[in-house]
């Protein structure tokens, strides 16, 4: 809702801006500024400046203008000057300076990548979701930010990417009753009214016509009917076709296999996969990336009621594969089953699904590291590298062959969970999803990656450039992956 805007004509060390100076840690801390501010070792020691990551120190510096002085903030980046350290430091600075109208970063001899990192970190770190705050808490609405040396190209790239992350965060942070499947679909239609991306919304009747038994089944218990939103960004010069499939459970109560009260808090975030599909396609279109990107947002509200699916029910998915529902809380894989076969019918070069899929992901990898599964090593390595470049940790997990046996059902083709067996829950889900990946013209499985973002979609406390609440993961990883295709 609130984040900074880049304005590249802002000058550092003037009385109406706060200048941020990154400080590297070392035997003697080193302010990485182009200006001579007299910040020698003795002065830094006096001020207690060490350059430790996240340390911030406010100072006044002398200027030539009539005010005679300007505010500056020294911000520690630790002992390296890599892009992630700069991004994080800028995120911390943005939160520290939430009441400043204008901020300029001054870094000695910055590269384009460093400038991009500082601005990205600042815009994302200063993000706040305040739509439902009744008081404004004095935070500046339209903060202006620059980093000396920034060009129009950098400004545009940072704006495209941060807008996409902010869009994703806003969707994910929205309370569940303010964003039911129909609202999500309407928001996507409005977003692309410039026709840069073709959007088609499938309502309940269309879902019936298309035989989408997974998403219909999950949505059956709710008064808010399910939807699929299909997006197509197809530039003329496309070098590859990537299909993105997102889990879009606008609220996951568990359904009749209802969650305990404490586990239900935060389940508005269960549409983070679908929101990241929208954000990624938004960025791809805005950057004009030469990649054909299709999106499938699988939207449903998972609620218990007299019309809800029951444990023991069998659903027929779009692919024709039948699924015995052993647990209605394992609903993400049900909506994705339809999405993965719809995407497969397009015969793309790669299918990527993104989902807040399993509590097991959080148990295995924690809150910040995405679990990456799939059927092909080369794409997997590219995705791992993309995550590393942008500072979104991603870790590869296997789909061991013995998990196939666990999928066996007595009365249908497969089960959606194995009651009483909690081992490798993230991997089980991967084995389930893999059943819905189609084959290409030559009879090979279509390359596929699965991002389990159950933990990383949300953070309870802010850190670096991640504001509290929705994180927007893995939009920047996906945009980076798309940007490296040629
Ligand atoms: N939406 C949850 C997964 C989740 C858990 C996301 C915690 C974010 C934080 C998913 O639909 C779910 O409930 N999965 C079950 C599957 C189980 C019943 C096989 C789980 O992981 O417990
Ligand atoms: Zn669930
Ligand atoms: Zn869920």
Image (cartoon, rainbow, N blue to C red):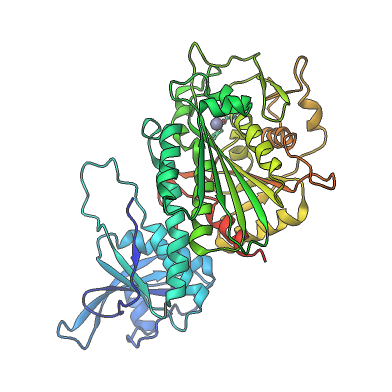
- Figure check: 358 above or below 138: above
- Closer to us: 78 or 227: 227
Image position of 414 (left or right of 133): right
| Residue sitting at x 74%, y 35% | 431
At x 64%, y 40%, the residue is 364
Residue at horizontal 64 percent and vertical 32 percent from the top: 338
Q: How many marks?
A: 0
Name the quarter where the C terminus is drawn. bottom right
The quadrant where residue 12 appears: bottom left
Of 290 and 461, nearer the camera is 290
- Identify the image quadrant of residue 339: top right
Query: In this view of the protein, can residue 33 be seen by the observer?
Result: yes
Do we see residue 52 in this rendering? no
Q: Regarding ligand 3, which quadrant of the image does it lie in?
A: top right
Q: Which residue sits furthest top?
A: 306
405 vs 52, nearest the viewer: 405
Residue 204 x, y percent position in the rendering: 52, 26
Expressed as whole percent of the image width and height from the top left, the position of residue 140 reads 24, 58
State the residue lying farthest toward the left.
66
- Relative vertical location of residue 321 with respect to residue 116 in this rendering, above or below: above
In the shown orientation, is residue 253 left or right of residue 410?
left
Q: Residue 401 placed where, x, y %?
A: 82, 36
Residue 466: image x %, image y %?
44, 54
Outermost residue on the right side: it is 442
Q: Is residue 391 above or below residue 264?
A: below
Q: Is residue 19 above or below residue 420?
A: below
């Amino acid at each position: 809702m609130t984040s900074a805007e880049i304005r590249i004509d802002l000058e550092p060390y003037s009385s109406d801006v706060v200048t941020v100076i990154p400080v590297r840690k070392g035997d003697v801390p080193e302010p990485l500024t182009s200006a001579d501010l007299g910040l020698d070792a003795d002065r830094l020691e006096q001020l207690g400046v060490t350059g430790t990551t996240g340390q911030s120190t406010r100072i006044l510096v002398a200027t030539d203008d009539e005010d005679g002085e300007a505010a500056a903030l020294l911000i520690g980046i630790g002992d390296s000057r890599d892009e992630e350290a700069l991004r994080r430091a800028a995120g911390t600075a943005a939160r520290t300076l939430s009441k400043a109208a204008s901020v300029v970063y001054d870094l000695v001899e910055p590269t384009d990548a460093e400038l991009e990192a500082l601005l990205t970190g600042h815009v994302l770190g200063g993000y706040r979701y305040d739509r439902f705050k009744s008081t404004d808490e004095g935070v500046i609405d339209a903060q202006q930010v620059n980093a000396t040396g920034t060009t129009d190209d950098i400004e545009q790239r940072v704006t495209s990417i941060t807008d996409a992350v902010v869009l994703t965060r806003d969707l994910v942070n929205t309370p569940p009753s303010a964003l039911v499947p129909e609202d999500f679909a309407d928001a996507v239609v409005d977003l692309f009214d410039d026709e840069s991306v073709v959007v088609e919304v499938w309502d309940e009747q269309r879902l019936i016509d298309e035989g989408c038994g997974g998403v219909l089944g999950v949505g059956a218990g709710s008064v808010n009917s399910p939807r699929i939103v299909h997006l197509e960004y197809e530039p003329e010069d496309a070098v590859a076709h990537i299909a993105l499939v997102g889990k879009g459970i606008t609220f996951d109560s568990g359904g009749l296999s209802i969650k305990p009260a404490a586990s239900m808090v935060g389940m508005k975030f269960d549409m983070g996969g679908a929101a990241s599909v929208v954000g990624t396609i938004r960025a791809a279109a805005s950057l004009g990336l030469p990649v054909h990107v299709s999106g499938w947002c699988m939207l449903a509200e998972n609620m218990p009621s007299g019309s809800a699916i029951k444990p023991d029910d069998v659903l027929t998915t779009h692919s024709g594969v039948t699924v015995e529902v052993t647990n209605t809380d394992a609903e993400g894989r049900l909506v994705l089953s339809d999405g993965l076969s719809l995407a497969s019918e397009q015969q793309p070069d790669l299918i990527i699904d993104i989902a807040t899929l399993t509590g097991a992901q959080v148990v295995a990898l924690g809150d910040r590291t995405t679990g990456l599964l799939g059927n092909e090593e080369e794409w997997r390595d590219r995705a791992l590298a993309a995550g590393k470049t942008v500072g979104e940790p991603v870790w590869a997990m296997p789909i061991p062959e013995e998990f196939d046996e666990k999928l066996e059902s007595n009365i249908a083709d497969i089960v959606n969970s194995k009651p009483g067996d909690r081992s490798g829950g993230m991997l089980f889900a991967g084995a389930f999803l893999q059943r819905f990946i189609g084959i290409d013209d030559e009879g090979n499985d279509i390359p596929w990656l699965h991002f389990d973002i159950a933990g990383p979609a949300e953070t309870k406390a802010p850190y670096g450039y991640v504001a509290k609440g929705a994180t927007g993961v893995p939009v920047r990883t996906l945009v980076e992956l798309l940007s490296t295709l040629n």
